[in-house]
Image (spheres, helix red, strand yellow):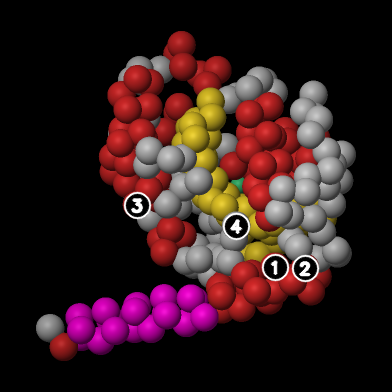
Amino acid sequence: MEEKRIKVALARDLLQKNKTFASDLRSRFARQGLTVINLLGSPGAGKTALLEASLPLLCRHYRVGVIEGDLYTSRDAERLARSGAAVIQINTEGACHLDAQLVGGVLEELPELDLLIIENVGNLVCPVGFDLGEDARAVVLSISEGDDKPEKYPQTFRTADVVILSKLDLLPYVSYDLPAVTATLAQLNPVASLIQLSATKESGLTPWLLWVKSVVAKKRGGAEGCHRVCK
Ligand code: MG
Ligand code: ZN
C-alpha cells in the first residue's frame, strides 16, 4: 500500500514537472511565432506515412521541422529527411512517450521554422498526459487497427483537435464499422474534425493540409499569407 502511494506521488510529480517545462516551451514558441502540432497515434497507424505524403506540400508554404520520437531506431527520421523538412530524432530508449523536457533539449538543433510537427512515440495511452507546448493535437487512427480503438482509449481522442482516419483504401478488405467509429468519435469529442484519407494513395490529403494551415493562421492571428490549397 505504501509503495503504491509513493508511485502515485512520483507520477504526479512527473506530470507537474512536465507542466512547468511545457509552459516554458509554449512561451518560447509564442515568442518565435512558431506553430507546433503534436501528432499522436498507435504504432503503425500511419503517422510517418502521413508526414511523408504531406511534408513536400507543406514545405512549399512553410519552413517545416519535424521532431521524430521513437523508442530506438531512426528509420522514420530517415524516411522523412527526404521531404525537405528539417528532421531531428529523439530516441526515448524505451520510454513510451515524449515529454516537454526532451523536446526542449533538441530545439537548438533546428533551424528557424514556421511550423514544427512532433511525431510522438506510437502509443495511445500515455502521450496524452504530456503537454509538449503544442498549439494543436492531431491523432491518427487507422482502418487496420480495428474499429474499437476510440472506445478503448477515449482520453487520447477527447484531447484531439483533429482525428485523421488513415488507410481508408483498406476499408473494402477489412471488417470495419465506419459509421459506428464516426459516431463514437463525435460523442467523445464533438469539436474535433474528422478527416478520412489514404496517405500512400495521396487521396484525401487536402482537408488535412487545410487544417494544418488553419492552425498556422490562428497562431499568426489570422494573418495567413497563403490560402492556396497545395494540390
Ligand atoms: Mg512513425
Ligand atoms: Zn509513456
Q: Quarter of the image holding residue 135?
A: bottom right
Q: Is residue 211 left or right of residue 3?
A: right
Disc 2, SS = helix
Q: Earlier in the sequence, mark 4 or mark 3?
A: 4
Q: Residues within 10 Å of mark 4 (few under 14, many from 20)?
A: some
Q: Residue furthest top?
A: 172
The label on residue 220 is: none
Span colored in magenta:
3-20
Pick whichever, 216 or 98, lies toward us.
216
Residue 101, quarter of picture: bottom right
From the image, state whether disc 3 or disc 2 is nearer to you: 2
**N-terminal label among 1 and 3:** 1
**Residue 130 sits above or below residue 211 on the image:** below
Residue extending farthest to the front is 222
**According to the image, label 3 marks what residue?**
155
Local secondary structure at mark 3 = helix
Q: Which residue is mark 2?
A: 32
- The residue pinned by badge 4 equals 135
Disc 1 designates what residue? 29
